Every structure is written in structure tokens, then in C-alpha cells.
Image (cartoon, rainbow, N blue to C red):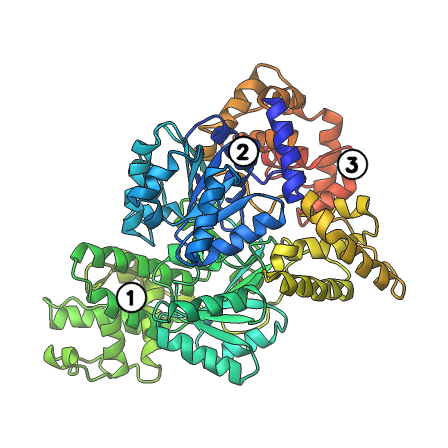
Amino acid sequence: MAQQATGLKELLGQYFGFTGFRPLQEEIVSDVLAGRDVVALLPTGGGKSLCYQLPALARDGLTLVVSPLISLMKDQVDALTANGVAATFLNSTLSAPEARARLHGLYDGQYRLLYAAPERIMLTDFSEKLRNWRINLIAVDEAHCISEWGHDFRPEYRQLRDLRGRLPVVPMLALTATATERVRVDIARQLGLREPRQYTASFNRPNLTYRVWRKSGPYGQMLGFIRARPDAAGIVYCHSRRTTEMLAQRLCADGVPARPYHAGMETRDRAAHQDLFLRDEVRVVCATIAFGMGIDKPNVRFVIHYDLPRNLEGYYQETGRAGRDGLPGECLLLFGAGDEVKLRRFIDEKPDPQEQQVAREQLKQMVDYAEGAGCRRVRLLGYFGETFPESDCGGCDNCLTPRQTCDATVPAHRFLACIEGLREATPRFEPNVNHIAGVLAGASTELIRRWGHDRVAAYGTGRDLPRAEWQALGRELVRLGLLRQTTGRFSAIELTAAGLATLRESRPVRIASFAEATPETRQRPLAGDVPCDEALCERLRRLRRRLAETRKVPAYVIFSDVSLRAMARAYPVTEAEFARVHGVGRQKLAEFAAPFMTEIADYLRTNPRQSFSAPDPAPLWQPARRELFMNDSASETLRLHKTGLSVEEIARVRGLSAGTVYTHLTATVQAGHPVDLGRLIPATVQTRIAGAFKQVTSGRLREVKELVGDAVDYGQLHLWRAANPAPASP
């Protein structure tokens, strides 16, 4: 096992230029190579593809990758080819001679990976071919598409279960970035997986900043946001095709290169727009949700939701397109009261009452997220059943600029009294938030007139506020527990015991003011930020683009932004130095080192080297959620620890790195399982760590590491902090 781990790390460095695994990758790869079925949920940008690419390189045979994303297959294969990996794809974009040539190569065993869509794979003649290609693994990407409970159900995925019967001994790896527990269970059942290992990484994306702005001239807000980031690429999500085209046209007129992208476009035009975006010739794509899934562009720096998403699951998936390379990304949601009204109309048109109820609950969660005053990261992770350990994430508008509270006693009492007044006047009528807002604002709707609510005492007493403000207040009173809302079609509301007491005892009510488009009051050191020589980095970007244009591939296929920034920190001018840059494998060293080293050397002739403090190497992608992680690898590590083995001995026995063992032990402590901390971290070292944490009030591990020095590694720091969540004050 240890020998296998060593071999995997050699392949990792040789082909991908990485020095270590991200959380869970090593365990998933090991299970796949052992022939086990696996369901893996890793966040967008968390390294899902490596979980099947590395096994493909570690043994003979062909790995079949099932992907619904025909338009991206070429770029995925180009990226692998640039790394020296023999990969190909088969889809409808190939000419007949091209397809025949690739089929011959598959029969001759020339490839390690084959990408194909589920529709092609399930064709009878194609299934017969698979038997002759020595398939050693079936990797099902975007596996949530197989579940009707998922947010992007695709019926053609259901046929993939037949692969189990046709290739019964071949292990299957199901991968997704977004799935609830119910969806994960359904994935395993629909694919016919045999006692699959389940891996679920944290949903947290610490390099992303989340913001919600109240709509106030949304186009101008969006344009200002984009112009403030002149070199950044981004995606703008809209509900309608018409809106995508309108926004793209206006952005172009205002000097921002943009293109629309939606399912109603000709396939050729849609592919051309995507290609322009991938090759950095267009900065912004205005898209319906059809564009987002699986977009393989790691340097998307921002995602803007011009319209309110239908649910938090889709919102998480779409915001996940930002910052896939681990560098900082920004997520902006523009929200107005009209968004909810529009989505409710769509829900009311659904023929199935059960679907309507589910959609209403999802919309309520989405609106609560948009209007809530608490940490957005806490709420987002909580949707997926994950608890964020802090109340202040430092990476959302509500944490960076806590919203001011205001006295809303008078309007709140007026709202509560209106409900009571209508109940007394018309006992059989069940009002909702929108109806009460209409009565207070003096609206003349058919429903208000029919029930005589234009003759009650409260009618028109709230004309001093817009109807949308009354609607927002009503939703806030629900969140405060003063009102109770049903989940039926009309979402009727009634006063709770607390609401009645507030009204009858004239208790004060304070609410949080809504977030506006204002600068944060404190700046957050962005997770994933890599300080570098920006002037050199820009020169390296221009060189990368020239090389990419020559080869007709996206720029990131040459080198990622992370690699460029690493070069602009380290100034490598020899092959040995260049080989140590993140993302530089053997193939890229041979093919691209010379022009980049020449550019760096030329820059240094007229510019001095800059010095940078070491970046915080703590992983951006968090360890697994403990309830599933403990069932698999971490529980075995804990068992070995209890037998008296050291971290190094456990690593040797299990074929893991010491860092992974520390990650396991940290997770066990956080899950409430005791470990012998004195054996894992000597008392003298614990004293040094405790002293450092007392000095570093921010709690950032990078600063703690600088104080304790190289004798203490990050694994020990993570473990000590987990065992001492609230160290005593001096």
C-alpha cells in the first residue's frame, strides 16, 4: 500500500505538477484502484477529475468518463494532452474520418481515457465496442443528473445502470459537486453500485465572497461591479433567454466584451460564444443556467445572479463556477421583491401539487438567504446539513459589514394588527404576506375588493411605505418568529404566541436594514490570494495567451493563473527552479519552460526581485464532513492510533501521507472522539503552540506557523486547534 501511495505521488508530480493531494483525493483514488464502487461529492474546483485521471495513469486499460457536456470534452482532452496524458473523446462534433481514427486508436490501446456522453454510450453498437477496449473504470461525472431529486435531472442518465450488467466487474466512480443526502443515496441505487464507499467533502468554498444587493437600477449596479474589476472574467446568470441577449448587447455597447448563452441558440453559435469565453476573448457571458454546469474555466473571478435563483442548491452550483483555481472569487446576487413574485407565478403553473409545495419551500429558503442578516456562509452550508464552526466567516457582506438594526416597532405592530383585523372581519379568509402588504399600501386588487378588505380600518394606513417594503417586513416578522407561515399554495400567515404578545404588550421590534451596494467596513484577507509581482504576472499572461492562440487551446491549458502567480513570486530562471512551480509536470516543463524562463530573465534585467511572505498552505478545500468521513478512512486511522502507532507508522501502514493522517485525527476530534494528544504532540510543542495562538488574535494558522517555526507542521496546528477550540486567555 505504501509503495502504491509513493507511485501515485510520483504520477501526480510527473503529469500534473502537484506535490500533494487535496482532501479525500488520495482515499478515493486508493478505493478505485482497489476495485471498489465510490460515490464522491467534492466541491467545484475540489479536484474531482483527478480522482479518475490518476487511476487511469496508474494501471493499464481504458477509463470511460461519462459526461453530459459535449461542448467541453475537447477542452478537457486538450488539457490532458498538454500534460502528456493520452486521452480522447467521441461525440457528434467529430467528422466521420476523425471518429474512425479515434476508434482505431481505442482498439489499439493508444488511450488511457475516453470521454463520451450517456446517449452515445448506451447505443447498442457502442456498448459492444466497450467490451473490447479493456475498460478498467467507469467514471460518471455530474452524477446528480441520474436522480429525479437532483436539481438537474436528465432521463438519459437512467440508462447508465445497464453498464453494470454489461461490464459487471468494472468499478464505478460517481462524482458530483452538489447533492443532498437523498440525492447521494439515489445515485448509488440508480447506478446499481455495490456497497459503495461514500466520500463527502465540506461544501465550504473559503476563497469565495458572497454578497447580496437590493436591486436599485440592476443594470447599472451590475455594470459598476464589472467595471471595478477590469481584468476579470465572469458569468451573469439570468432566468430568461431574452434577458441574456439584452444584457450582453448593453454590456458590449458599454465597452465590456460580452456574449449571450442559452438553449435557444443555434448549437454552432452557442459553441462559438463558449469558445470565445474560454479563450479569454470575451470577458463576460450572460447565460441561463444551461451554461453553468461543468464549465471548465478555472479563472472565472466573479458570478453575478441578475435574477433570484429558484433554490439554494442551484445557487451553490452556479456560484461554484467562480474561483475554481483556488484564487479569490466573488459572488453577487441582485435581489428585489419582484423576483419572488415572478417565481411564485412559475410555481403556481406547475401541474403537480407536491412539486408546487417543494418549490415553494425551496423559494422560501432562497429568499431567507437573500434577506437574512446573519452569515451567508453559515446559512448556505446549513442547507446541506453542514455546520460552519464560526458565526463570522469574514467572507460575506453580512460579516464584513454587519447590517445596522433599526426600530420597526410602529410598522411591525401595524402589520400584526392588520392580520388580526382581517381575521376578525373575515374569519374564513387566510391572508398571506402579499395580501397584508396590499391592504396596508392601499392596493385595489380584485381579492381585496371581493373580501371587502378595502373597507377595514387598516386599509391604506401604510401608504407611506412602498408595497415591496411591507412585503419584506412581513417576511422578516416570519423569520423573527412573530408570524407563522404555511407551506400551502397561498402561504397563509398567522400570529404566533410571540406575535400576539408583541402586539398586545406593545413590545419593541427591531429588524436588520437591507444590504445596499456599499463598500465593506473591514477588508478580509482573501483565502487563496497569492501575492506576486503583478507587472511580471501580466507579462506572463500575455505570453501564455500567445502560446495558447498558436496551439488553438484555452489559455489555462498552457498554465493556470495559480502557476503564473507562483512564477511571479519565485522568478524561476533554471529548469530545476521551474520544475518546482505548482502545476508544472514533466510534459509542461519540456514544452513551455524555455519561453517562460526567457520572459522572466528578460524582466529581471530591468526590474528588481520582490520579496513575499510564505503563503498560507492550509488547504482551501476542507476535510470531509465528519459523519461520512468517520465511516470510512478516518475511523481506520483512529483505530490504529488507539493501538499505539505514531502518525508516521500509521502513514506507512495505510499508504497515506502524514498530512492526511493528521487530517483524519483532526476530524475525529471535531466529531467528539478522544485521541491521545500528548502522544501526538509533545508537551513542550503544545506549550509553544498555545503561546502562539494567544499572540495571534486573528487565529490565522499562517501567522501562528510563523511564530512556532518549521519544527511544528500544519497538521499538528490543525489538530491542536481542534482539541483546544477556546484556549484560555492570558
Q: Secondary structure at mark 1?
A: helix
Q: Position of residue 212 (x, y in %)?
A: 47, 67
**Is 643 positioned to the left or the right of 625 in the image?**
right
Q: Which mark is residue 503?
A: 1
Q: Secondary structure at mark 2?
A: helix
Residue at 21%, 59% in the rendered image: 356
In the image, what residue type sits under mark 2? Ala
- In the rendered image, the vertical position of residue 371 relative to residue 160, given as above or below: below
Q: Decide if residue 410 is in sight here.
A: no
Q: Residue furthest top?
A: 643
Residue at 60%, 19% in the rendered image: 653
Spatial separation of the CA atoms under disc 2 and disc 3: 23 Å
Label whose residue precedes the other's in the sequence (1 or 2)? 1
Q: Which mark is residue 710?
A: 3
Question: In the depicted view, which residue is nearer to us: 101 or 338?
Answer: 101
Residue behind mark 2? 667
